[in-house]
Amino acid sequence: MEEIRKFVEGEYKKPTSKYGYAHYEGHFIPVVNYSTELAKEKNADAEIVEISAWLHDISSIIYGRENHHITRAEISEKKLKELNYSEEKIELIKKCILNYRGSINNSRESIEEQIIAEADTMSAFDNIEGLFQVDFLWEDLNQKEARKLIREKLIRKYNQLSEEGKKLIKSKYDAVILLLGEKMLTEKSKIKNFLCFPQGEL
Ligand SMILES: [Fe+2]
């Protein structure tokens, strides 16, 4: 397992990496941690889950976001063969890697595939700054638009989770939904704002 983690970390550290180290900490580590927790809760194969979590986005680091999902399965297969994993395990891991994208409710054959999809969704709650960065830089949204959109996105993500996933993320979900909710515009602050902007530009 340590060899696989080092392989992924090594790819992040290369100058040719498409993502910075912040993405490693903000996405890969949470996906691995949530997958591991879900595997315990759901009695899944912990080894298949953890390896799949480490490798699930490997092609994005090496080649960027736009590349086809097949690439990540090929890269993973090559690495796992080098490390002498059995054909049977490699096939199970490839399925997790190939099928995690899309709605969580998509039909997936194994509980391990389901867990990778769910952990990938849950990782958003550990990378709120990354969500804002995407909306500012790539979607060109202003602060108010981004705040509203991200709040809605996180509600949708939470509602897709299983009961186990919801339980694991509940405190983070409650906190971020509160923080991205209505701003505190009390009557007092409205009056104060009005005095600053006599034309009523609140
Ligand atoms: Fe991912």
Image (cartoon, rainbow, N blue to C red):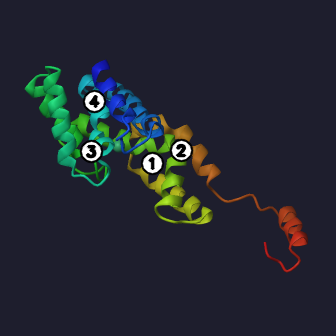
Q: Nearer the viewer, mark 3 or mark 2?
A: 3
Identify the mark at residue 158; answer none if there is no mark.
Answer: 1
**Where does residue 52 sit, x and y in percent of width and height?**
26, 33
**Where does residue 34 sit, x and y in percent of width and height?**
40, 33
- How far apart in space, not on screen, are marks 1 and 4 (Cα)? 21 Å
The amino acid beneath tag 4 is Val
Viewer-side residue, 129 vs 110: 129
Q: Earlier in the sequence, mark 4 or mark 3?
A: 4
- How far apart in space, not on screen, are marks 1 and 2 (Cα)? 8 Å
Q: Nearer the viewer, mark 3 or mark 1?
A: 3
Identify the mark at residue 100; answer none if there is no mark.
Answer: 3
Q: Which residue is mark 2?
A: 173
Tags 1 and 2 in contact by the CB under 8 Å rule?
Answer: yes
- How far apart in space, not on screen, are marks 2 and 4 (Cα)? 24 Å
- Picture layout, residue 128 above or below residue 91: below
Query: Local crowd at mark 2 within 10 Å, few (<14), some, or many (≥20)?
Result: many
Please name the residue shown 50% across and 43% down the image.
127
Identify the mark at residue 49; answer none if there is no mark.
Answer: 4
Number of marks: 4
Q: Earlier in the sequence, mark 1 or mark 4?
A: 4
Q: Earlier in the sequence, mark 3 or mark 2?
A: 3
Mark 3 near ligand 1 (CB under 8 Å)?
yes
Is residue 110 among the parts visible in the rendering?
Answer: yes
